[in-house]
Amino acid sequence: MDTKLTLKLNREIIEKAKEYASDKKMSLSRIVESYLKSLTSEKKTGEFDISPFVKSIATGTNIPTDLDHKKEYSDHLVQKYK
């Protein structure tokens, strides 16, 4: 059963997140839900990777519009498992 949640966030971050959600053809609610699910399903070690998009929201850093996130993630995995 879905429950409504109200969040108070910076307007610029909300606009960027809405644009990202639109590009991915997903609702912003679904993205937030997926992120929170990933946070709560991690092992208790407290260590997990955060996507560049989420980091940019948290830090206010701009991500290039031509960023190939699949390539970046692939490169990350190659480095991680060297």
Image (spheres, rainbow, N blue to C red):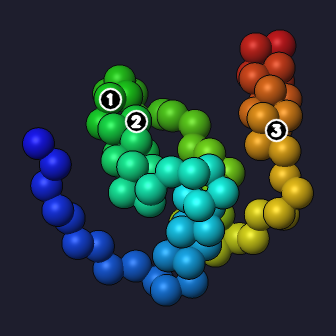
The residue lying at 42 percent from left, 45 percent from top is: 35
Q: Is residue 13 visible in the rendered structure shown here? A: no
User: Spatial distance from mark 3 to mark 2, Cα to Cα?
Assistant: 20 Å
Residue receiving disc 3: 72
The residue lying at 50 percent from left, 51 percent from top is: 26
* Label 3 with label 2: CB-CB less than 8 Å: no
User: Spatial distance from mark 2 to mark 1, Cα to Cα?
Assistant: 5 Å
Local secondary structure at mark 1: helix
Q: Which mark is residue 51?
A: none
Give how far across and how far down residue 64 sits, in percent.
84, 63
Q: Is residue 27 visible in the rendered structure shown here? A: yes
The residue lying at 16 percent from left, 48 percent from top is: 2
Name which residue type carries label 1.
Ser
Name which residue type carries label 2.
Ser
Give how far across and how far down residue 80 sits, in percent.
75, 22
Up-down relation of residue 10 to residue 60 (above or below): below
Residue receiving disc 1: 41
Q: Left or right of 72: which side holds 18?
A: left
Give how far across and how far down residue 75 sits, in percent.
85, 29
Foreground of the two, 49 or 1: 1
The residue lying at 29 percent from left, 73 percent from top is: 7
Q: Quadrant of the N terminus?
A: top left
* Label 1 with label 3: CB-CB less than 8 Å: no
Local secondary structure at mark 3: helix
* Label 2 with label 1: CB-CB less than 8 Å: yes
Q: How many numbered circles does the render carry?
A: 3
Give how far across and how far down residue 13 sits, in percent.
54, 76
Earlier sequence position, callout 3 versus callout 2: 2
Which quadrant of the figure has residue 3?
A: bottom left
Q: Quadrant of the C terminus?
A: top right
Residue receiving disc 2: 38
Of all residues shown, which one is farthest toward the top? 82
